[in-house]
Amino acid sequence: MRYDWFDLVAENAVEQGDVFRSFDVPRVVRDGSGRYVARVTHGDYIVLSQTCDLENDKVNEVLLANVLSYDALCGSGGQNFRSTGFRKSIVRGVLPAYFLLPPHGEMSGWSWSIVDFHHLHLVEKVACEEYVKSSGPRLRLRSPYKEYLAQSYGRYMMRVALPSPLSAFESYKPA
């Protein structure tokens, strides 16, 4: 089945929904002695910053989220990503920390992928602009899918953990 979620673009503008493949991002971590050190992480990322902010120079940094191949995620162990329950939940959108991206036939090596909102990165806008100038064609989410990504990220960020859930209502019987 062909999914029409993406355009293949080669323009120099960075937009929300752009996929950066094999991109290096800096990360600050604490080393064994408790000092902060910079590390470089290499992987695939998607732009979460809004296009209007990028176009109008309202931001100097671009917010990126990790994009993981579903096959690689299944091979990494940990959470039961292979389960039918996980796949059904991500399709229904009930796992707020994850967003499902379909395969794209024209982009070699791009299969089912998961955006992981747990792992976000801020990268200088100029570094992103340099990347798009030198990387060749890349995937960009089309409308309304880029807005769907933004909405999913918004739902993840605005989760509220109530001190006492209203789960008693599930067994309530009206008079």
Image: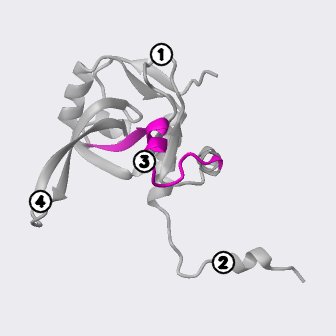
The CA distance from mark 2 to mark 3 is 29 Å
Instruction: Tell me which amino acid carries mark 3.
Output: Asp
Mark closer to the chain start, 4 or 2? 4
Say what secondary structure mark 3 lies in.
strand
Residue under pointer 1: 106
- Residue at 60% from the left image edge and 54% from the top image edge: 94
- Could you say where residue 121 lies in the image, as x and y percent from the top left? 28, 47
- In the displayed structure image, the side of residue 42 where residue 7 appears, left or right: right
**Secondary structure category for the residue under label 4:** strand
User: Dot 4 corresponds to which residue?
Assistant: 36
Above or below — where is 88 with respect to 105?
below
Q: Amino acid at mark 1?
A: Glu
At numbered mark 2, what does the secondary structure look like: helix, strand or loop? Answer: loop
Q: Which residues are magenta?
A: 62-84
Q: Bin the neighbour count of mark 2 within 10 Å (Cα to Cα): few under 14, some 14-19, many 20 and up.
A: few
Which of disc 1 and disc 3 is earlier in sequence?
1
Marks 1 and 3: in contact by CB < 8 Å?
no
Residue 166, numbered label = 2
Can residue 48 be seen by looking at this rendering?
no
